[in-house]
Image (cartoon, rainbow, N blue to C red):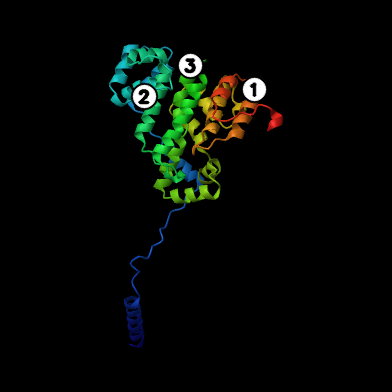
Amino acid sequence: MESTAITQEKELQTTTSAELSPPPAENEEIEEVIPEYTQSELLEKVINSYPPLPKVALMLRDCAQDTCSSWCIEEVTGAISDDPLLRDHLINLVNSPFYGFSNEIVNLRQIVSLLGINNVASIAIATFFESSIHINVSPYGLEPEEFIIKSRKAVSFVSDWFSSIDKKFAQELIPCILLLRAGMVLFSKVLLEVRKDKAFLESLKANNYDITLVENEFFGTDHLKILADLFEKWKFDDLIVESAKFIENPGEAPIEAMKNAYVLAIANAAFGPRGVQNKKKVSELVRQARKQAVNINIGRLIEICPFTIILDDRAK
C-alpha cells in the first residue's frame, strides 16, 4: 500500500511539473539538428549525383569515339534535330563570339562538318549538364546568374586567345571550359541536401574565400579534381580527361596534354570562381610554360589579358 501511494505521488508530481512548465516562447528558435558526415561520405554523395547522359549525348559520344563507326552525318544531324534544346543551344553557341565564325550558320550538317563530331559530342554533354541540374551555388555565396556570367568570361578569354591563330584548338577546349565549374554545382547540390550549406559558407568567409581549402575541408578534394573524374565517367576524349586531371599542376601533364592543361590552368587562375584574378599565379604559369617550351601563344595572351603578365623572374 505504502509503495503504491509513493508511486502515485511521484506520478502526480511529474504530471504537475509538466503542466506547470512554461510552453516554448512563440519566437523562440528551436536548434536544428544537422547530421554529421565524413569527407568520404560527402564525396560519395557527390559522385552518386553525377547525372547519367541522355540517349542523344551517348550516341554522339560513342560515334565520336568509334573509329569504325558506320554512323553517317545525316544520322548524327537527325539525332540532334530530335532534341530541340540541344539543336538550339548548338546553333546559338556556334554563332556566338566564342567560335568566331564570320557568317551565321544554321545548317546542322555544316555545323557538324566544321566542328567535328568529337566537339559536337562535348557540346551536347555540356548542354545536357547545364539543363539537367538546377544551378544553386548559394553555399559559395554566389547568385546563379553571377556564377554563369563569371564562368562565361573564361570561355571568351580562351576564344580570344586562340581563335585567330588556332581556331580548332579553341573550339575543342570550349566545352571543357563551359564545364570548368561543374564540380561547384555538384558540391553545392550535396551541401544543400545535407544542410551543410551554411557551415560551408561560414568556413569560406573565415578562410578569406579560399575555395580549394574549404572544399578539401568538407569533401577531401576540390571541384577541379571532380571535373576530371566527371569527364572520365562520361567518357570524354582521353586528351580532354588528361588535360582536366592536370589543371592544378600542368607542368606534370603528359606531353600531349600539357598545352591544354596550361591553357585551362591559366583560364582558371585569370577568372576564378568568384571573379578573382590570381595575377601572380597566371604570371607563374606563363613563365613555367615558357621554361618547358610549351607553345601557348604568349604574345597573344599578353595582348588580351586584362592585367599585366610578368615574364621576368627577377620582377616577381
User: Which residue is the site of mark 2?
Assistant: 57
Q: Is residue 141 visible?
A: yes
What is the x, y in percent for residue 25?
A: 35, 69
Considering only order in the chain, which callout, 3 or 1, is on the residue closer to the N terminus?
3
Q: Is residue 218 above or below residue 167?
A: below
Instruction: Find the distance from the CA under tag 3 to the CA under tag 2.
Output: 24 Å
Task: Write the residue at 28% across / 21% down.
Answer: 82
On residue 298, the disc is none
Quadrant occupied by the C terminus: top right
Towards the viewer: 15 or 125: 125
Q: Are marks 3 and 2 in contact (CB under 8 Å)?
A: no
| Amino acid at the residue labelled 3 | Lys
Task: Write the residue at 48% across / 29% down.
Answer: 154
Instruction: Find the distance from the CA under tag 1 to the CA under tag 2.
Output: 37 Å
Q: Secondary structure at mark 2?
A: helix
What is the x, y in percent for residue 12?
A: 32, 81
User: Which residue is the site of mark 3?
Assistant: 167
| Amino acid at the residue labelled 1 | Arg
Q: Secondary structure at mark 3?
A: helix
Q: Nearer the viewer, mark 1 or mark 2?
A: 1
